[in-house]
Image: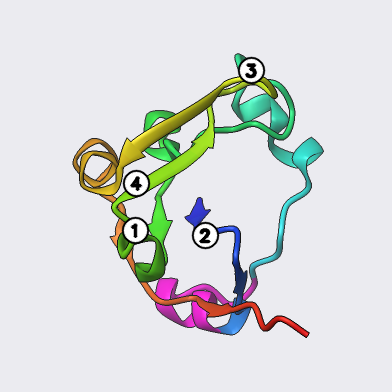
């Protein structure tokens, strides 16, 4: 599970190199909806560790004091200090994004 700010874009080559995989691709919501049965499709929270998934965080997210993410539904949001998220998830920090340019 790769976690990044919404204002960033994944650079797949950076992610592949960092985790040592030859092939990665963006999964559709339908591809992994069964992994999160208690969540509405498209609202999976960034706690992949609870589902035996490796969790990778781009360091740009760690720069934020507070992070916000879906709480398993389209109507609920969780706001959490990044340092608390890091304690709960223990993600691996790897750079795999670029900031979105505004045209």
Q: Please identify, in this view, whether the residue under mark 2 or under mark 3 is nearer the observer.
A: 2
Which residue position holds label 3?
Answer: 37
Residue 5, numbered label: 2
Tell me the distance, in whole angstroms, between the alpha carbons under discs 4 and 1.
Answer: 5 Å
- Tell me the distance, in whole angstroms, between the alpha carbons under discs 4 and 3: 27 Å
Which quadrant of the view contains residue 18? bottom left
**Magenta residues, as a range?**
14-23
Relative to residue 90, is residue 50 drawn left or right? right
The residue that disc 4 covers is 66
What secondary structure is found at the residue carrying circle 4?
A: strand
- For label 2, the SS is loop
Alpha carbon of mark 2 to alpha carbon of mark 3: how far? 24 Å
Q: Residue tagged by mark 1?
A: 64
Instruction: Classify mark 3: helix, strand or loop.
Output: loop
Q: Are marks 4 and 1 in contact (CB under 8 Å)?
A: yes
Residue in the image at 72% along x and 35% along y: 42
Q: Secondary structure at mark 1?
A: loop
Percent from the top left, x then y, of residue 78? 45, 29
Q: Residues within 10 Å of mark 3 (few under 14, many from 20)?
A: few
First-in-chain label (2 vs 3): 2
Of 2 and 62, nearer the camera is 62
Q: Earlier in the sequence, mark 3 or mark 1?
A: 3
Of circles 2 and 1, which is in front? 1
Mark pair 2, 1: CA separation? 9 Å
């Amino acid at each position: 599970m790769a976690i990044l700010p919404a204002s960033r874009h994944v650079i797949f080559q950076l992610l592949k190199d960092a985790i040592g995989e030859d092939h990665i691709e963006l999964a559709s919501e339908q591809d992994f909806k069964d992994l999160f049965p208690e969540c509405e499709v498209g609202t999976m929270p960034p706690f992949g560790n609870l589902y035996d998934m490796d969790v990778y965080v781009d360091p740009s997210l760690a720069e934020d004091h507070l992070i916000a993410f879906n709480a398993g539904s389209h109507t609920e949001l969780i706001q959490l200090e990044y340092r608390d998220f890091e304690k709960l998830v223990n993600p691996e920090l790897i750079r795999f994004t670029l900031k979105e340019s505004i045209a």
